[in-house]
Image (cartoon, rainbow, N blue to C red):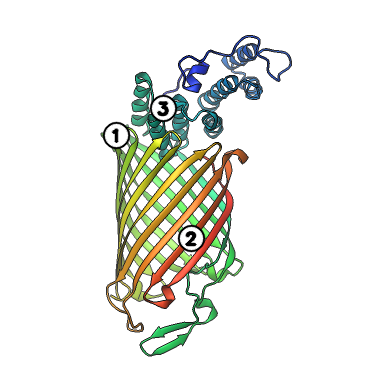
Amino acid sequence: MALAGVATGATAQVASGQEDVPAPRAGERTESKSLSAVQVFAMAEEARAKGDFPTAEVAYRALTQDRDLEVRTEARFRLALMLGDQLHRYSDAALELRRILDDKPGAGRVRLELARMQAQMGNLAAARRELRAAEASGLPPEVEQLVRFYSRALTAKKPFGGSIEVALAPDSNINRATRGDKLGTVIGDFTLDDDAQAKSGLGLDVRGQGYFRLGISKSAELMTRVSTSATLYKDSRFDDISLALQTGPQFVSGGDLVTVSAGPTWRWYGLDPYSLNLGGNAAIQHPMGKRGQLRVEGGASHVTNRRNALQTGWDYTLSTSLDRAFSARFGGGLQFYGFREAVRDPGYSLASGGVSAYLFRELGRTTLVGTVGYSHLEADERLFLYPKRRIEDRYNASIAATLRALHVGTFAPLVRLRWERNRSTIEIYDYRRVAAEFGVTSAF
C-alpha cells in the first residue's frame, strides 16, 4: 500500500466535503426492489465485512443510481474505498472518486483519496496535482494534516505500471517542410523534389510508457522507465519512431523529490535508423507552498546521427517549470527552457531557448488543457550551401479535451488541435503546420 488506508465507515459528510450533511435518510428509495437507501447501505456493509465483495459492489452500484445526490455520493465513496483498499482495483476506484468530483469539485477529502489511488497506480504527478487541488479547495486543519502525511508517503508505490495513448492524427505538414518549390543557395536556386516539400497525411499516433521500481531504502528506490512514441503513415517513408530506456535512483530529501537517470534513446525515420542518444539527466521537484510545485531539470547526451556524421555531437538541456493550482478545478504552469547542440560542423551547431505556458480547467466531466509557446534558435555559423546563418522563431499552440463522460474502463476519448509556425532565414526550415488528434488516453 502506498498510503495508509482510511476507515470505510465514512459518512456522507466526508465524501461531500461538508460538515453538516446527514447520512442517507430512512425511507429514501433506490431502484433496488423496495429497500430503502439505509437498508441497502447496511446490506452492502455487512457483505463487505464478511468478505463478500461482489455482493457489496452490486449494492453500492445500485445506490449510485439513487435520485438523491448525497446518497449517490456516499455510495461511490464507499465503493471506491472498497475497490482500492480491499480489491486493489485502483483505477476503478479512481473512476468512482472522479465521478464524485465532477458533481462536487470542492470535496477535499475525496481529492485526497483520489491522490492516494493515483499514487497506488504510480501516477505521482497526477497524485501531487490532486493534493494541490485539495489545498486550493480549502481544508479544515485536521484534514490538512492528512495532506502533509499523504505528501510524505508518496514514496512507497506500485512496483510497476504504465500508460498508453492512441489517436488518429490528420496533419497538414507531416514532414515539417516548406511549401515552396525553390531553395536559395550561394550557387543559385535549387528546385525541391516532392519529398522535400510539405506533405499532408493521416497518421496513427501511439505513445506509451512503462515503469518498474525497486526499493533501495525507506526513502529511495531504483526507477526504470521505458517510453516510446510513433507516428505511422501509409507511406512509411515518413514514419517517425523513438524508443527510450532510462534507469536511475529516485529519493526524497526533506520535502524535495530528486531523480537521476541515464540510458539510450533510439530514433528511426522512414523505418531506417536515424540517431542514437546516450546520456542522462537529473531533476529536483520542490513544493512551493500548499498549491505550487517547482521543478528544475538538466541533462546531457551524446548524439550519433546515422544520416549525417556532421550532426554527431553533444546535446545539453536545462529547464525550470512552475505548476500551481488556482482552485480545485483550475490550474496552470509556466516553463522556461534552454537547449545547446554542439556537433562536428558549426553550421549545424545551435542554441535555442523558449517559454511555454498552460492552463487546465475541469468543466463537468471534461478536462480542457490549453498551451502556448515560443522559442528562438540560432546556429553558430552559416552552412556553406546557404546564403544566411540559420535563425528561427517558432510559435505553437494547442487545445485538448479529455471527455471522461464517455470513458470505457480507465480510458477516455481525447480530442486535440495543434498549430505551429516556424519562421526561418533558411527556406527549407520555414513551415506552417496544423494537426489534430482523435483518440483515447488513459483517464488516470
Circle 1 — which element? loop
| The N terminus lies in quadrant | top left
| Disc nearest the viewer among 1 and 3 | 1
* Residue 442 falls in image quadrant: top right
Residue position marked by numbered label 1 in the rendering: 289
Amino acid type for the residue under numbered disc 3: Leu
Residue position marked by numbered label 2 in the rendering: 419
N-term-proximal mark, 2 vs 1 = 1
Q: Residue 3 carries which label?
A: 3
Q: Position of residue 160 (x, y in %)?
A: 46, 40
| Disc nearest the viewer among 3 and 2 | 2
Amino acid type for the residue under numbered disc 1: Gly
* Residue 204 falls in image quadrant: bottom right
**Among all residues in the image, which is located at the extreme top?**
26
Residue at x 54%, y 79% (from the top left corner)? 194
Circle 2 — which element? strand
Q: From the viewer's perspective, is residue 116 above or below residue 298?
A: above
**Label 1, label 3: how many angstroms apart (C-alpha)?**
22 Å
**Among all residues in the image, which is located at the extreme right?**
33
Whether residue 200 appears in this view of the structure is: yes
Amino acid type for the residue under numbered disc 2: Trp
Q: From the viewer's perspective, is residue 165 above or below residue 45?
A: below
- Please tell me how crowded label 3 is: few (under 14), some (14-19), or many (20+) other residues with Cα within 10 Å: many
Q: From the viewer's perspective, is residue 164 above or below residue 101?
A: below
Circle 3 — which element? loop
Q: Is residue 157 left or right of residue 80?
A: left
- Please tell me how crowded label 1 is: few (under 14), some (14-19), or many (20+) other residues with Cα within 10 Å: few
Q: Where is residue 103 in the image (x, y as percent from the top left)?
A: 54, 29
Q: In this view, does 219 lie to the left or right of 102?
A: left
**Label 3, label 2: how many angstroms apart (C-alpha)?**
41 Å
Residue at x 34%, y 35% (from the top left corner)? 291
Viewer-nearest residue: 74 or 433: 433
